Image (spheres, rainbow, N blue to C red):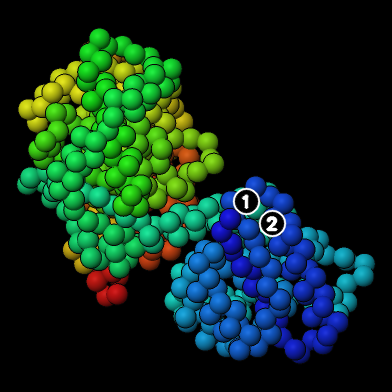
Amino acid sequence: MKKIYFLTGSQYLYGEETLNQVAKDSKNIVDFLNTTKATVEYVWIDTLKTTEEILQAIKKDNFDDECVGIITWMHTFSPSKMWISGLKILNKPYLHLHTQANEKLPYDSIDMDFMNLNQSAHGDREHGFIGTRLRKNRKIVVGFYKDAEVIEEINNWARVTLAYDFSKNLKVARFGDNMREVAVTEGDKVEAEIIFGWSVNGYGVGDLVDYINKVSKNEIDKEFDFLKEKYLLNTENIDSVKEQIKYKIAMSKFFKENKINAFTNTFQDLHGMKQLPGLATQELMAEGIGYGGEGDWKTACIDAVMMKMSCGKKGSTGFMEDYTYDFSKGNELVLGSHMLEVSPSFAITKPKIEVHNLGIGGKEAPARLVFDGVTGNGIAVTIIDMGDRFRMIVAEIELVKQPKEMPNLPVARIMWKIKPDLKTGAKAWIMAGGAHHTVVSTAITINDMRDLARMYDIELIIIDEKTEINQFEKDLMYSDIIYKLR
């Protein structure tokens, strides 16, 4: 289990008795956090009282592969100049917890000794100043540490740190290049590795075909029997289904041997393959492999990262594309889908395995999973390359039940309302340069993505219930100026 180190600040001014109590109280907080539903281990570090102690603690954190972040808390007054050397070199995510050992004031007995010990209202403001002065991106959580909302904020942030840690070593395979003449799927792969840690590399389709040709009949038959139990077989074209199974097995082996966590492909580059991977890609996404259609490696990467963020949480996360609209007055809807590749994590009904012509690419009809989508509150996320920076756009959406059956649409689909309404939300998305490919999630919140953007130190644009288009346009201009100055 990965670790987050809990650093408590104080100083020698208060004497041994106070410092012993500081250590005891901070350890109690850490022990309590470890009783919550955390996805990390919180590790208590002895009270830091000097510049050298702080520097050594942060140096250790920086080079500890098990450490994914730090939490700081100033139980007493910890002069912030002591933190400069340490915070300047900090390269891990950073949460400043503004809490107290006590929830309520002991009105009848409070004295100066109590005040000197329990002065985080004082000490944390000193610490907050130096974080701001050093321009350190950090999350600030305020409240009594046993409060349910505080625990949720801390544990959600911890979950994001795991995804950020995963992101730093994310490897992406691009089978073929981007779809021809498409702009938004392009981007600076070197800068992406500098900013996000994503190692994005191309592989010839022939490299994959070699793996496909080595898949045995026994492997295919075994997987076919498994999928017949897992899904509803709604086709007589078993050869197409088995072809997809062959692709899935081959890609799984390729990814394992090359430590790949995400991939892209395109229907324009399938030399040596009979079909575009459909069922195969859907199955891989269900196992946590990120995907981006038509060579869209940025979406494949953030898909993998967001799936990592959603591990253990209720809800669905996966690659998506805004396909078409229902402009019915008062009930405007987006139909999200793709040619084939929608994760079965979105299925509200038991998926059917079907085979249909693709209509583009000139290959055989591929097998795919067909199903209706889940409902609930969610977000749609995209990352675009603005030329001088990366921009993350997050839109608040509500996934809804499709109004009517779609018996002639042979793909998986979900439907949603974009906030605050379709006209405003779509206009804002286009104004911000949002891509047609997204990652949709009902497991992850805007606040989670805000934490991730802060860790990446990239521009974040939010479209939500409060979006007003005139102000939004001004905010985009202000943001452009700010990032150009940076």
Judge from the rendering whether residue 44 lies leftward or rightward of residue 186; answer left or right.
Answer: right
Q: Tell me, for residue 66, which label it has, or none.
A: none
Q: Tell me, for residue 33, which label it has, or none.
A: 2
Query: Label 2 crowding class (10 Å Cα cut-off): few <14, some 14-19, many 20+?
Result: many
Judge from the rendering whether residue 441 lies leftward or rightward of residue 145; answer left or right.
Answer: left
Q: Residue at x 18, y 39 (%)?
A: 209
Q: Residue type at mark 1?
A: Ala
Quarter of image, res 58 = bottom right
Q: In which quadrant of the rendered image does the N terminus lie?
A: bottom right
Judge from the rendering whether residue 371 lies leftward or rightward of residue 12; answer left or right.
Answer: left
Q: Residue at x 88, y 77 (%)?
A: 111
Q: CA distance from mark 1 to mark 2?
A: 8 Å
Q: In which quadrant of the rendered image does the C terminus lie?
A: bottom left
Q: Residue at x 71, y 78 (%)?
A: 47
Q: Is residue 294 above or below residue 122?
A: above
Nearer the observer, 158 or 405: 158
Nearer the observer, 486 or 225: 225
Residue lying furthest right: 108
Q: Position of residue 329 (x, y in %)?
A: 29, 23
Q: Is residue 244 above or below residue 133?
A: above
Q: Is residue 163 visible?
A: yes
Quarter of image, res 425 = top left
Q: Position of residue 389 (x, y in %)?
A: 25, 65
Q: Tell me, for residue 38, which label it has, or none.
A: 1
Nearer the observer, 154 or 133: 154
Q: Position of residue 223 (x, y in %)?
A: 37, 25
Quarter of image, res 408 = top left
Q: Pointer 1 and pointer 2: residues touching (CB < 8 Å)?
A: yes
Q: Residue type at mark 2?
A: Leu
Judge from the rendering whether residue 291 lies leftward or rightward of residue 3; answer left or right.
Answer: left
Q: Is residue 425 visible?
A: no
Q: Residue at x 19, y 18 (%)?
A: 356
